[in-house]
Amino acid sequence: MSNSNNKLWEGRFKKQLDGVVNDFNASIHFDSRMFREDITGSVAHTQMLAKQGIITVDEGEKIIEGLCGILEDIENGKLEFDFGSEDIHSFVEKELTERIGDEGKRLHTARSRNDQVALDIRMYLKKEIDCIVSQLKGLILVLCTLVEKHATTIMPGYTHLQRAQPVSFGHHLLAYANMFSRDIDRLSDTKKRMNVLPLGSCALAGTTFDTDRGFVAEQLGFDSVCGNSIDGVSDRDFVVETAAACSLIMTHLSRFSEEIILWCSWEFKFIELDDAYSTGSSIMPQKKNPDIAELVRGKSGRVYGNLISLLTMLKGLPLAYNKDMQEDKEAIFSCIDTVKLCIEVFTPMVETMRVLPDNMKSAAAKGFINATDGADYLVSKGLPFRSAYKAVGQLVEYCIENKKTLEELTLDEYKQFSELFDNDVYKAIDLLVCLEKRTSEGGTAPTEVLKQAKKVKEKLL
Ligand code: ARG
């Protein structure tokens, strides 16, 4: 499919590139998505060349007009990518020269595709990071609304998937809000480190032309200019960091998905997903399946795989540019696309789920999740914690044998295990009281949960 097999390196070669090799070598079918960044970068580069007198002002204007025309025509569908071109950079340059003539051939002065591609990915990822950050903010806001609504909705908190202590559903959801908030921090840190202009590194060694890299950086919204041209064209740390940040987002989404899947089961029935976010079975009429959550959980694999691909691709590369690095794009694009898609479906799925507090409460009533509070009660009456722990352990054992809960025991029964038990024990082990008393910072008390939710929300602004 090599209809325009004319190459940038024509002068040095006698034969045309083999057709299959041409396709093998090409990246335009995936890097064409960076056309905006490529053209915007070229415009800034041209402005700099003209300002520095490396090309004339007239030549600069003609090039910029040509580039803007190409951008406009791609945007409105008038210009299609030529998939015979090697990559987006050669496509734009060839198109420019066809449109404006010889001036187009001056665009590539004092740069190389090596610094050009390093620029394009940085610009592209900066934009996509902003997009993911705003999606995460949307998800966190949805969670915070649920947190506020369910600050007193009691559910069993688990360790080892065993009922452990009462918490509120809001408290549990706020844990995820905190994870996603750190995901935003990670993406923002990554963006800060990537916000360094590589353009002007040229092929690897810099240039003999009197360029003004600071000017280009300013035009394109970069904080600074890379201080080593070899590093400028070789560095893909920021791609790995983005993939790592995406991987952790997927980890968080996946753990959350796993819980949603559990909570939807008849064994839990803590929530029910909206019909719009559930699927049925082709054979079992009673089924309502959490496919969306399962897919999100499943898609984490491809994002982790991309992270490993990127690390492996880079680990043996001598400096500076090597063609292996072209492989970074499909991997990171796949990370970005997957994460965006997952958050897009996950957020409304969570927003529309029906919470079933009664089922949570009856699960919380079983499993002796107030046993710690029973022990704390004895401690408040003066018993050392270890002895209190033992007394309540024996109480639980007694309850299991006699098919009773702690709430159902008589005071006489209590007193068989410790004389310190009194009538106020029933209040002390009341689940809501257990919740309300955990006012330690970050604890499950509704007052504390609401305070922490407010903090998470404030951080978003
Ligand atoms: N398509 C290439 C890439 O994605 C652009 C840089 C090509 N440079 C080169 N010297 N062949 O990495």
Image (cartoon, rainbow, N blue to C red):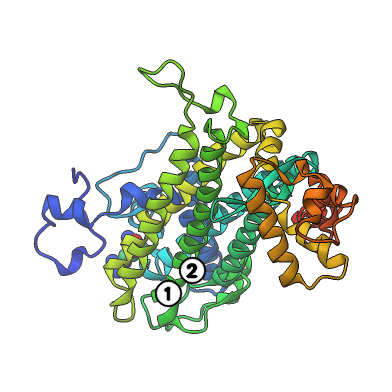
The residue lying toward the viewer, choosing from 185 and 126, is: 185
Rounded to the nearest angstrom, the CA distance separating label 1 from label 2 is 8 Å
Kind of residue sitting beneath label 1: Asp
Q: Position of residue 106 (x, y in %)?
A: 40, 64
Left or right: 19, with 345 as reference point: left
The residue lying toward the viewer, choosing from 164 and 44, is: 164
Residue at (52, 59) in percent of width and height: 248
Q: Is residue 429 above or below residue 321?
A: above
Residue at (57, 72) in percent of width and height: 193
The residue lying toward the viewer, choosing from 356 and 244, is: 356
Left or right: 121, with 413 as reference point: left
Left or right: 400, with 438 as reference point: left
Where on the image, by quarter, is ligand 1?
bottom left
Kind of residue sitting beneath label 2: Phe
Q: Position of residue 186 (x, y in %)?
A: 59, 65
Res 235 label: 1
Residue at (75, 59) in percent of width and height: 417
Q: Secondary structure at mark 2?
A: helix
Name the quadrant containing residue 331. bottom left
Q: Position of residue 410 (x, y in %)?
A: 81, 44
Residue of label 2: 238
Question: Does residue 436 show up?
Answer: yes
Q: Position of residue 157 (x, y in %)?
A: 66, 50
Q: Secondary structure at mark 1?
A: loop
